[in-house]
Image: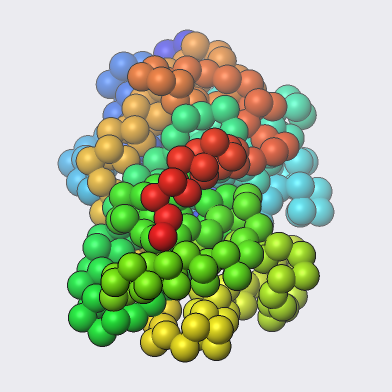
């Protein structure tokens, strides 16, 4: 169908490439279908509160390709958390004359998208997250940028660690999964990688570091995902409780592993927590291309009436998969991938 009115919003943690998706949607909707696009601000809250901006296919939309973050703003609240959420959303979309909605977000956002779709709203999702943990798609945009930032940091830590004979811990993002730690650790030649999917044994990490020093190496680099957990009974972790969204508040696993190594081995240890640096700034070329393709395909899917789906990357191709296939569980690092990385530890 031509001449539609499409709405989009970005929800969850921001991610390099969000603006490239928005640009892809606006350019495709306008030039290929003569449609218009409106953006809701600050995620689902903006849709609930009917805060929207018209997005024009002009020079300003072109310039956002390089820009990190999201021009629409984002939020973490999900639509099913609002009282009368469904009725309000339906009324606001009808009022704005919206024919289709494209929510861009991670697993939680796509869950919200599925809920709306199950309740009769025409929805096409776009998966995003630096964590790369959305099921059904080979990669999410933002991941490549985060890995590049983390790898650059690891590269830099090698020289300072070697100069000072230190063990350097690098804590990267990855609440539930260790994709960033795995890829950045492998690319950066880390001597140990710790991920949430594989509970760690501090004694084993210490052994790997000891082996290095005994063999005459002068330093060690350990990459740790923020959500990593010790094997039961091997190490006490500080507890941080949960935040207003039910997310566990982390207490600095990198620092705690570092303290333990120092106490057990006596080595000089330093910890670097990369945090939101991994999420900010301009997307890599790979992420710009992937995000743009997602935006173009999401706009096409709306005009072809492929609702209740999300775009996904399968090999070289962008495909539409049911929203149900992208939610419910997360895409974890398979054991085999971790085994491959382990071959390089120590
Ligand atoms: O977007 C996912 C993520 O980057 C997680 O890896 C991390 O735990 C979380 O977001 C941090 O979010 P916030 O911006 O709320 O601190």
Residue 59, percent across and down?
18, 41
Query: Who's the residue at 39% across and 87% down the image?
Result: 268
User: Is residue 207 at all visible to an observer of this figure?
Assistant: yes
Query: Who's the residue at 59% across and 33% down the image?
Result: 135
Indicate the quadrant where residue 263 lies.
Answer: bottom right
Along the line of sight, the residue nearer the viewer: 146 or 123: 146
123 to the left or right of 5: right
| Above/below status of 238 relative to 91 | below
Query: Who's the residue at 69% across and 38% down the image?
Result: 329
Residue reaching furthest right? 83
Residue 89, percent across and down?
68, 42
Query: Who's the residue at 53% across and 59% down the image?
Result: 194
User: Is residue 103 at all visible to an observer of this figure?
Assistant: no
Along the line of sight, the residue nearer the viewer: 253 or 288: 253
60 to the left or right of 45: left
Residue 337, percent across and down?
50, 39
188 to the left or right of 266: left
């Amino acid at each position: 169908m031509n001449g539609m009115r499409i709405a989009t919003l970005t929800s969850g943690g921001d991610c390099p490439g969000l603006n490239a998706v928005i640009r892809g949607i606006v350019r495709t909707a306008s030039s290929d279908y003569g449609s218009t696009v409106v953006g809701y601000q600050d995620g689902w809250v903006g849709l609930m509160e009917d805060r929207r901006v018209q997005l024009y296919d002009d020079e300003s939309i072109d310039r956002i390709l390089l820009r990190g973050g999201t021009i629409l703003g984002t939020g973490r609240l999900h639509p099913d958390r609002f009282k009368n959420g469904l009725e309000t959303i339906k009324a606001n979309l009808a009022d704005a004359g919206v024919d289709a909605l494209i929510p861009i977000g991670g697993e939680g956002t796509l869950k919200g998208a599925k809920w709306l779709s199950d309740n009769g709203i025409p929805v096409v999702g776009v998966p995003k997250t630096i964590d790369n943990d959305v099921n059904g798609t080979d990669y999410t945009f933002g991941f490549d940028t985060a890995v590049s930032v983390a790898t650059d940091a690891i590269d830099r830590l090698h020289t300072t660690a070697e100069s000072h004979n230190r063990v350097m811990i690098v804590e990267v993002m990855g609440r539930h999964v260790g994709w960033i730690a795995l890829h950045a650790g492998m690319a950066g030649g880390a001597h140990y990688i710790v991920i949430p999917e594989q509970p760690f044994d501090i004694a084993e990490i210490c052994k790997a570091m000891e082996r290095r020093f005994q063999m005459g190496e002068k330093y060690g680099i350990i990459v740790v995902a923020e959500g990593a957990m010790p094997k039961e009974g091997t190490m006490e972790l500080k507890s941080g409780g949960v935040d207003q969204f039910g997310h566990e508040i982390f207490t600095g696993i990198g620092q705690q592993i570092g303290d333990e190594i120092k106490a057990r081995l006596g080595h000089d240890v330093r910890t670097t927590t990369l945090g939101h640096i991994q999420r900010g700034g301009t997307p890599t070329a790979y992420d710009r291309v992937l995000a743009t393709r997602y935006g173009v395909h999401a706009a096409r899917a709306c005009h072809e009436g492929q609702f209740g789906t999300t775009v996904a990357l399968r090999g070289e191709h962008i495909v539409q998969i049911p929203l149900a296939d992208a939610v419910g569980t997360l895409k974890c690092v398979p054991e085999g991938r971790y085994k491959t990385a382990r071959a390089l530890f120590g």
